[in-house]
Amino acid sequence: SDHLYVTFFSGHGNVAEEIKIRDIWRCMGVDSSRILHFSPGNYKLIPGSVSCGPRSTIHYDTLKGRSGVPQFKNYDKSIVTMWKINFTESITHADGSVSALDTLHVDT
């Protein structure tokens, strides 16, 4: 666990922060210092009538004894993305509007 970091969507524009995902990681025992908020990279959004929703990513830090939180925006090869979890809950229309899906999905 000393090498793992997880991210959650911290909100962007009119899309709210996804605190449920953050709280799930906390309930699973992940230390708060290893739960990082990212925006907008942690939101799966592709224009043009496609599904979208918040994303949580699990990262592995290959360095031992790193002090502080690594810089993920310009990270080097020492940070490995292990898993992306997309919580599909909305659909984006060609005009840019967003509406809720009837059913929620998880895409890994």
Image (cartoon, rainbow, N blue to C red):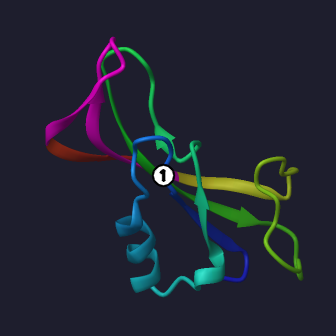
Residue at 37 percent of width and 14 percent of height: 48
Q: Eyeballing the image, is 32 above or below 52?
A: below
Residue at the location (66% across, 81% down)? 33
Write down the residue under mark 1.
11
Dot 1 surroundings within 10 Å: few (below 14), some, or many (20 or more)? some
Q: Is residue 20 magenta?
A: no
User: Considering only vertical position in the picture, is 78 above or below 51?
Assistant: below
Residue 100 in view, yes or no: yes
Q: Residue 55 location in percent, x, y?
A: 46, 50
Q: Quadrant of residue 71?
A: bottom right
Residue at far left of view: 102
Q: Which amino acid, by three-letter code, is at mark 1?
A: Gly
- Picture coordinates of residue 108, whole percent (x, y): 42, 47
| Residue 108 shows in the view | no
Q: In the figure, is residue 32 to the left or right of 76? A: left
Q: Main secondary structure of the magenta part?
A: strand
Give how far across and how far down residue 16 sits, in percent. Answer: 39, 52
